[in-house]
Amino acid sequence: MEKARHALEQKKAIQAAKLTLCIVQEMMDLLQGADDSDGIIGEMIEESLAFIAEIIDDEELSPVQKEDIFDKLMKEAINKRYDGWTDWRLDLLAKCSELADNRNLRNKLENHLVSLIENEKGDSWSFNYLAEKINLIRYYMIEKYDGQKKAAEFIDQNLQYTDFRKMAIESAMKNKDYSEVVKLTLDGEEKDEGSAGLVAQWKGYRYKAYKLSGKLNEQREIAMNFILKGDFEYYQELKKTYDTKEWPSVYPEIILLLENQKKIYLDIYTYILINEGEKQKLYEYVKGRPSTVDYFYKYLIPEFTEEIYGLFRQYIEQTAARANSRKDYQGVCVIIRNLKKAGGKEQALEIKEKLFTQYANRPAFRDELSRV
């Protein structure tokens, strides 16, 4: 790599590219039969590809040099050594696109990219991934050399791919064309209904479009959808859409909906109870799950002090009964210390002495208890 860097410093870009590709070739060949669990070979390849980016970024490259490096990169990308290493092959082809500033080179690259897609026809995840990445290379080439209008047309032709739909949505958002944002997101939600992550992404854009266009009912509907799937951020967003007099009649319905769901998103449920000061409901929740008292006690004292101390005792005794190693014993002691932090010093001493007697035949446990 030092020789390649020296060549570049000497303005010998072609030589630098040739030397760097030699390193890539050696590392790729080595990778075929080596264990690269530590990632060293992969890092060398990544470093070499990054250096190639430096080489082609040189503004002083002549058309002849560009074409020479382009041909070298194309030849390398086509090599069978990259079968199974799609990302590195695509990285090389993307670098070719940076050099293809004349029609001849562009046609050569375009034809190869199209042939890659056609040769891999199918509907598998791997094909869709390859096709999307290849079309992104084509898109950036069109954007760079043919202008925004052609690039926008290419986006519209490739909305089946996530990155292209996202670009179309963000373009419509930038132009304040919120009805187009809604259309694109609804289409995306239908197309990607099997992917919860993508559906949530499209819904997030649709929420933003409704919010910016003043469609309050639609905004609230999506916020509620996110809340019922555990997103506290949208609870805060929804709360902002109501005045302080309205809200007290709204949030109890959300709590009820969460309680009646088959799948309860416990984090958002308890966050709402804490946020709205619903201490009785929070206590009932903790009462049914004594192991959570460690975290929630601070929100329930002083109103439920004695009840909390009782739950701590129950939790400590249950945990002690399961403990069978020093690490487990230390865990019990942590809970006892938390009981003390909650103000239950007497109760902590009482349970400590009880355990000390109850587990007299466990010296390691008694040792840990003595440190509390």
Image: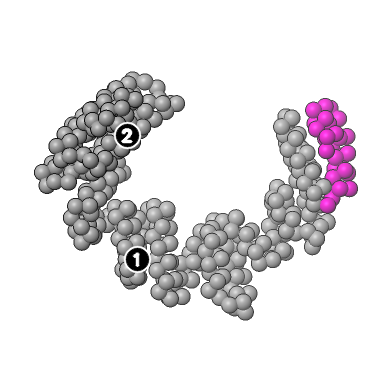
Q: What residue is drawn where x is 36% and y is 60%?
A: 189
**For this view, does 117 lie left or right of residue 248?**
left
Q: Position of residue 357 (x, y in %)?
A: 88, 34
Please tell me whether mark 2 sits on a helix, a strand or a loop.
helix
Magenta span: 343-372
**For this view, does 224 lie left or right of residue 138?**
right
Please tell me whether mark 1 sits on a helix, a strand or a loop.
helix
Label 2: which residue? Answer: 51
Q: Amino acid at mark 2?
A: Phe
Q: Amino acid at mark 1?
A: Lys
* First-in-chain label (1 vs 2): 2
Q: Residue 174 has which mark?
A: 1
Q: In the picture shown, does residue 141 fall above or below 279?
A: above
Q: What residue is drawn where x is 40% and y is 68%?
A: 209
Query: In terms of secondary structure, what is the magenta stretch mainly?
Result: helix
- Disc 1 packing (10 Å; few <14; some 14–19; many ≥20): few
Q: CA distance from mark 1 to mark 2?
A: 35 Å
Q: Position of residue 49 (x, y in %)?
A: 31, 34
Q: Residue 81 has which mark?
A: none
The answer to whether residue 211 is magenta is no
Q: Quadrant of residue 187?
A: bottom left
Q: Quadrant of residue 304?
A: bottom right
**For this view, does 335 lie left or right of residue 201?**
right
Q: Position of residue 56 (x, y in %)?
A: 25, 39
Q: In the picture shown, does residue 182 fall above or below 3?
A: below
